[in-house]
Amino acid sequence: MKKKQFSKNLFLKITLFSIVAFLLLFLSGNEWFIYVDSAPREAGIEEVLVDDLADEGEADADYYEELVEAVEVDEVYVPRPERVAFLTFDDGPSRYTLDFLVVLAEFEVPATFFKIGQHIEHMSGSRELLNQVLAAGHYIGLHSMRHDMATLYQEPESAAYFVNEMLENQALVYYLTGHHTSLCRPPFGSMGNFTEDHYLTVELANINCINWNVDPSDWQNRDPQVVYQSIRDRVYRLNFPGELMIVLHETSWTLEVLPDIITFLLEHDYVFKIYTPGFEFRYTYYR
Ligand SMILES: [Zn+2]
Protein backbone atom coordinates (compact mmCIF):
# COMPACT_ATOMS: atom_id res chain seq x y z
CA MET A 1 0.00 0.00 0.00
CA LYS A 2 2.83 2.35 0.98
CA LYS A 3 4.77 1.41 -2.10
CA LYS A 4 1.75 2.14 -4.25
CA GLN A 5 1.38 5.60 -2.64
CA PHE A 6 5.06 6.28 -3.25
CA SER A 7 4.91 5.43 -6.94
CA LYS A 8 1.78 7.54 -7.30
CA ASN A 9 3.62 10.54 -5.85
CA LEU A 10 6.57 9.93 -8.14
CA PHE A 11 4.26 9.76 -11.10
CA LEU A 12 2.65 13.08 -10.13
CA LYS A 13 6.08 14.70 -9.73
CA ILE A 14 7.25 13.49 -13.12
CA THR A 15 4.05 14.73 -14.76
CA LEU A 16 4.35 18.15 -13.08
CA PHE A 17 8.01 18.41 -14.05
CA SER A 18 7.21 17.55 -17.66
CA ILE A 19 4.50 20.22 -17.84
CA VAL A 20 6.81 22.89 -16.39
CA ALA A 21 9.64 21.90 -18.72
CA PHE A 22 7.31 21.98 -21.71
CA LEU A 23 6.00 25.45 -20.76
CA LEU A 24 9.52 26.80 -20.27
CA LEU A 25 10.59 25.48 -23.65
CA PHE A 26 7.52 26.98 -25.29
CA LEU A 27 7.88 30.40 -23.61
CA SER A 28 11.54 30.57 -24.52
CA GLY A 29 10.47 30.65 -28.21
CA ASN A 30 12.51 27.62 -29.03
CA GLU A 31 13.07 27.05 -32.73
CA TRP A 32 11.34 23.74 -32.60
CA PHE A 33 8.02 25.45 -31.97
CA ILE A 34 8.49 27.76 -34.90
CA TYR A 35 8.61 24.80 -37.24
CA VAL A 36 5.39 23.28 -36.00
CA ASP A 37 3.60 26.62 -36.29
CA SER A 38 1.33 26.25 -39.29
CA ALA A 39 0.24 29.89 -39.47
CA PRO A 40 1.70 31.89 -42.36
CA ARG A 41 4.71 33.74 -41.03
CA GLU A 42 5.09 37.05 -42.74
CA ALA A 43 8.12 38.04 -40.68
CA GLY A 44 11.21 38.35 -42.81
CA ILE A 45 14.50 36.65 -42.24
CA GLU A 46 15.95 39.97 -41.09
CA GLU A 47 13.68 40.05 -38.08
CA VAL A 48 14.51 36.48 -37.14
CA LEU A 49 18.21 37.09 -37.56
CA VAL A 50 18.21 40.22 -35.41
CA ASP A 51 16.13 38.53 -32.73
CA ASP A 52 18.45 35.56 -32.63
CA LEU A 53 21.54 37.72 -32.35
CA ALA A 54 19.94 39.96 -29.76
CA ASP A 55 19.18 36.89 -27.68
CA GLU A 56 22.81 35.90 -27.83
CA GLY A 57 23.71 39.38 -26.55
CA GLU A 58 27.00 39.33 -28.44
CA ALA A 59 27.29 42.16 -30.90
CA ASP A 60 26.38 45.83 -30.93
CA ALA A 61 23.53 47.53 -32.82
CA ASP A 62 25.71 48.59 -35.80
CA TYR A 63 26.77 45.03 -36.32
CA TYR A 64 23.16 43.88 -36.44
CA GLU A 65 22.30 46.56 -38.95
CA GLU A 66 25.15 45.58 -41.21
CA LEU A 67 23.95 42.01 -41.22
CA VAL A 68 20.36 43.02 -41.88
CA GLU A 69 21.39 45.04 -44.92
CA ALA A 70 23.33 42.11 -46.30
CA VAL A 71 20.26 39.87 -46.29
CA GLU A 72 18.53 39.66 -49.63
CA VAL A 73 14.77 40.02 -49.81
CA ASP A 74 14.52 36.79 -51.83
CA GLU A 75 15.62 34.84 -48.80
CA VAL A 76 12.58 35.78 -46.76
CA TYR A 77 11.18 32.52 -45.57
CA VAL A 78 7.42 32.10 -45.54
CA PRO A 79 6.39 28.57 -44.59
CA ARG A 80 3.62 27.10 -46.63
CA PRO A 81 0.28 27.02 -44.82
CA GLU A 82 -1.00 23.55 -44.05
CA ARG A 83 -4.14 23.96 -46.12
CA VAL A 84 -4.04 25.84 -49.40
CA ALA A 85 -6.95 26.37 -51.76
CA PHE A 86 -6.60 27.49 -55.36
CA LEU A 87 -9.85 28.86 -56.78
CA THR A 88 -9.78 28.71 -60.56
CA PHE A 89 -12.38 30.11 -62.95
CA ASP A 90 -12.33 28.82 -66.52
CA ASP A 91 -13.76 29.97 -69.85
CA GLY A 92 -13.84 33.73 -69.28
CA PRO A 93 -13.74 36.58 -69.77
CA SER A 94 -17.48 36.90 -69.50
CA ARG A 95 -20.15 39.39 -68.47
CA TYR A 96 -19.81 37.99 -64.94
CA THR A 97 -16.06 38.53 -64.54
CA LEU A 98 -16.47 41.90 -62.80
CA ASP A 99 -19.04 40.46 -60.39
CA PHE A 100 -16.60 37.69 -59.49
CA LEU A 101 -13.98 40.33 -58.75
CA VAL A 102 -16.42 42.05 -56.38
CA VAL A 103 -17.11 38.88 -54.37
CA LEU A 104 -13.42 37.96 -54.23
CA ALA A 105 -12.60 41.49 -53.03
CA GLU A 106 -15.22 41.25 -50.28
CA PHE A 107 -13.45 38.19 -48.91
CA GLU A 108 -9.96 39.44 -49.85
CA VAL A 109 -9.34 36.16 -51.61
CA PRO A 110 -7.17 35.75 -54.73
CA ALA A 111 -8.09 33.50 -57.64
CA THR A 112 -6.81 32.28 -60.98
CA PHE A 113 -8.70 32.95 -64.21
CA PHE A 114 -8.05 30.72 -67.22
CA LYS A 115 -9.15 32.81 -70.19
CA ILE A 116 -10.14 31.68 -73.66
CA GLY A 117 -8.42 33.65 -76.44
CA GLN A 118 -11.51 33.90 -78.62
CA HIS A 119 -13.58 35.29 -75.75
CA ILE A 120 -10.90 37.91 -75.14
CA GLU A 121 -10.94 38.86 -78.83
CA HIS A 122 -14.72 39.06 -79.10
CA MET A 123 -15.54 40.85 -75.88
CA SER A 124 -15.49 44.61 -75.97
CA GLY A 125 -13.49 46.13 -73.16
CA SER A 126 -11.62 42.90 -72.53
CA ARG A 127 -8.28 44.70 -72.28
CA GLU A 128 -9.53 46.80 -69.37
CA LEU A 129 -11.19 43.78 -67.81
CA LEU A 130 -8.02 41.65 -67.92
CA ASN A 131 -6.03 44.49 -66.45
CA GLN A 132 -8.60 44.90 -63.70
CA VAL A 133 -8.29 41.19 -62.88
CA LEU A 134 -4.52 41.54 -62.57
CA ALA A 135 -4.69 44.83 -60.67
CA ALA A 136 -6.97 43.16 -58.11
CA GLY A 137 -4.18 40.67 -57.38
CA HIS A 138 -5.54 37.70 -59.29
CA TYR A 139 -3.70 35.52 -61.78
CA ILE A 140 -4.49 34.96 -65.45
CA GLY A 141 -3.66 31.64 -67.10
CA LEU A 142 -4.15 30.15 -70.56
CA HIS A 143 -7.11 28.11 -71.75
CA SER A 144 -6.56 27.82 -75.54
CA MET A 145 -7.93 30.08 -78.28
CA ARG A 146 -11.08 28.19 -79.31
CA HIS A 147 -11.71 25.51 -76.67
CA ASP A 148 -12.50 22.94 -79.33
CA MET A 149 -12.22 19.29 -78.30
CA ALA A 150 -11.64 17.93 -81.84
CA THR A 151 -8.92 20.42 -82.73
CA LEU A 152 -7.08 20.18 -79.43
CA TYR A 153 -7.16 16.41 -78.96
CA GLN A 154 -8.65 14.32 -81.74
CA GLU A 155 -6.73 15.13 -84.89
CA PRO A 156 -3.36 13.74 -86.00
CA GLU A 157 -1.72 17.15 -85.49
CA SER A 158 -3.62 17.97 -82.31
CA ALA A 159 -0.53 18.14 -80.10
CA ALA A 160 0.86 20.90 -82.30
CA TYR A 161 -2.52 22.67 -82.47
CA PHE A 162 -2.78 22.52 -78.68
CA VAL A 163 0.59 24.16 -78.15
CA ASN A 164 0.03 26.71 -80.91
CA GLU A 165 -3.28 27.78 -79.38
CA MET A 166 -1.69 28.15 -75.94
CA LEU A 167 1.19 30.20 -77.35
CA GLU A 168 -1.27 32.39 -79.27
CA ASN A 169 -3.30 32.84 -76.10
CA GLN A 170 -0.09 33.65 -74.23
CA ALA A 171 0.89 36.32 -76.78
CA LEU A 172 -2.60 37.84 -76.70
CA VAL A 173 -2.68 38.13 -72.91
CA TYR A 174 0.84 39.58 -72.92
CA TYR A 175 -0.04 42.07 -75.66
CA LEU A 176 -3.08 43.34 -73.77
CA THR A 177 -1.68 43.35 -70.25
CA GLY A 178 2.09 42.84 -70.18
CA HIS A 179 1.43 39.76 -68.05
CA HIS A 180 3.47 36.78 -69.20
CA THR A 181 2.22 33.37 -68.23
CA SER A 182 3.01 29.79 -69.15
CA LEU A 183 0.39 28.34 -66.83
CA CYS A 184 -2.31 26.51 -68.72
CA ARG A 185 -5.50 24.69 -67.91
CA PRO A 186 -6.12 22.14 -70.68
CA PRO A 187 -9.75 22.51 -71.83
CA PHE A 188 -11.67 19.42 -70.61
CA GLY A 189 -8.54 18.41 -68.64
CA SER A 190 -5.47 16.53 -69.84
CA MET A 191 -6.65 13.20 -68.38
CA GLY A 192 -7.80 10.92 -71.14
CA ASN A 193 -7.20 13.65 -73.72
CA PHE A 194 -3.43 14.15 -73.85
CA THR A 195 -1.44 11.84 -76.13
CA GLU A 196 2.28 11.21 -75.63
CA ASP A 197 2.83 13.87 -78.30
CA HIS A 198 0.91 16.37 -76.17
CA TYR A 199 3.11 15.75 -73.14
CA LEU A 200 6.22 16.10 -75.27
CA THR A 201 5.28 19.25 -77.18
CA VAL A 202 3.90 20.96 -74.10
CA GLU A 203 7.17 20.33 -72.29
CA LEU A 204 9.24 21.54 -75.24
CA ALA A 205 7.17 24.74 -75.35
CA ASN A 206 7.68 25.28 -71.59
CA ILE A 207 3.97 25.25 -70.91
CA ASN A 208 2.93 24.22 -67.42
CA CYS A 209 -0.44 22.44 -67.45
CA ILE A 210 -2.59 22.02 -64.40
CA ASN A 211 -5.84 20.09 -63.94
CA TRP A 212 -7.79 19.97 -60.62
CA ASN A 213 -8.79 17.76 -57.72
CA VAL A 214 -12.18 19.33 -56.98
CA ASP A 215 -14.71 19.62 -59.79
CA PRO A 216 -18.39 20.35 -59.06
CA SER A 217 -19.11 20.34 -62.84
CA ASP A 218 -20.67 23.79 -62.54
CA TRP A 219 -20.76 24.13 -66.33
CA GLN A 220 -23.44 21.44 -66.14
CA ASN A 221 -24.96 21.68 -62.64
CA ARG A 222 -26.89 24.93 -62.67
CA ASP A 223 -28.22 24.72 -59.14
CA PRO A 224 -26.03 26.79 -56.77
CA GLN A 225 -26.75 24.43 -53.87
CA VAL A 226 -25.74 21.39 -55.93
CA VAL A 227 -22.45 23.11 -56.76
CA TYR A 228 -21.85 23.95 -53.10
CA GLN A 229 -22.74 20.47 -51.85
CA SER A 230 -20.56 18.85 -54.48
CA ILE A 231 -17.52 20.85 -53.35
CA ARG A 232 -18.27 20.22 -49.68
CA ASP A 233 -18.71 16.47 -50.21
CA ARG A 234 -15.53 16.21 -52.24
CA VAL A 235 -13.44 18.07 -49.65
CA TYR A 236 -14.80 15.80 -46.91
CA ARG A 237 -14.14 12.72 -49.04
CA LEU A 238 -10.55 13.85 -49.63
CA ASN A 239 -10.32 14.41 -45.87
CA PHE A 240 -9.28 18.07 -46.11
CA PRO A 241 -6.08 17.68 -48.13
CA GLY A 242 -3.17 20.12 -48.00
CA GLU A 243 -4.01 21.40 -51.44
CA LEU A 244 -7.31 21.99 -53.20
CA MET A 245 -7.36 22.88 -56.87
CA ILE A 246 -10.97 23.81 -57.51
CA VAL A 247 -12.22 24.18 -61.06
CA LEU A 248 -15.15 26.56 -61.46
CA HIS A 249 -16.66 28.52 -64.32
CA GLU A 250 -17.85 32.09 -64.74
CA THR A 251 -21.55 31.32 -64.45
CA SER A 252 -24.32 33.18 -62.61
CA TRP A 253 -25.08 30.19 -60.32
CA THR A 254 -21.44 29.78 -59.33
CA LEU A 255 -21.29 33.50 -58.66
CA GLU A 256 -24.35 33.18 -56.43
CA VAL A 257 -22.86 30.44 -54.28
CA LEU A 258 -19.26 31.66 -54.26
CA PRO A 259 -19.56 33.39 -50.84
CA ASP A 260 -20.73 30.08 -49.32
CA ILE A 261 -17.87 28.16 -50.95
CA ILE A 262 -15.27 30.64 -49.68
CA THR A 263 -16.82 30.74 -46.20
CA PHE A 264 -16.80 26.93 -45.97
CA LEU A 265 -13.10 26.79 -46.90
CA LEU A 266 -12.15 29.64 -44.55
CA GLU A 267 -13.97 27.92 -41.72
CA HIS A 268 -11.77 24.89 -42.35
CA ASP A 269 -8.54 26.88 -42.22
CA TYR A 270 -7.84 27.04 -45.93
CA VAL A 271 -5.57 29.85 -47.09
CA PHE A 272 -6.24 31.04 -50.64
CA LYS A 273 -3.31 31.36 -53.03
CA ILE A 274 -2.53 32.01 -56.66
CA TYR A 275 0.34 30.61 -58.66
CA THR A 276 3.51 32.57 -57.97
CA PRO A 277 7.13 31.62 -58.60
CA GLY A 278 8.45 30.05 -55.44
CA PHE A 279 4.99 28.92 -54.45
CA GLU A 280 4.46 26.14 -56.96
CA PHE A 281 1.68 23.64 -56.64
CA ARG A 282 2.47 20.87 -54.22
CA TYR A 283 1.01 18.24 -56.52
CA THR A 284 0.74 18.35 -60.24
CA TYR A 285 -2.39 17.04 -61.86
CA TYR A 286 -0.63 16.53 -65.09
CA ARG A 287 -1.57 12.99 -66.00
ZN1 LIG B 1 -12.91 25.31 -70.23
Image (cartoon, helix red, strand yellow):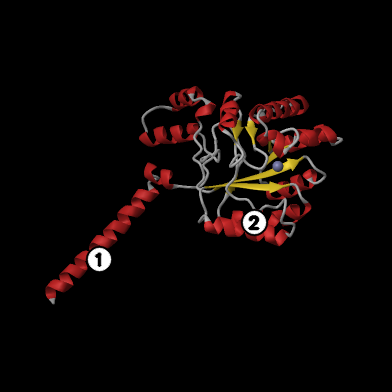
Task: Pinpoint residue 162: horizontal percent, then vertical percent.
Answer: 67, 30
- Answer whether residue 131 is visible to the viewer in this image: no
Task: Determine crowd level at label 2: few under 14, some 14-19, many 20+ residues with C-alpha closer than 10 A.
Answer: few
Which one is in front, 166 or 238? 166
The quadrant of the image that shows the N terminus is bottom left
Q: Is residue 172 left or right of residue 74?
A: right
Residue at image x 37%, y 46%? 28
Which one is in front, 151 or 129? 151
Q: Which is nearer the N-term, disc 1 or disc 2?
A: 1
Amino acid residing under circle 1: Leu
Which one is in front, 100 or 245? 245
Where is residue 183, by image quadrant? Answer: top right
Above or below 44: residue 268: below
Question: Which-is-in-front pick, marks 1 and 2?
Answer: 2
Residue pointed to by mark 1:
12
Residue pointed to by mark 2:
263
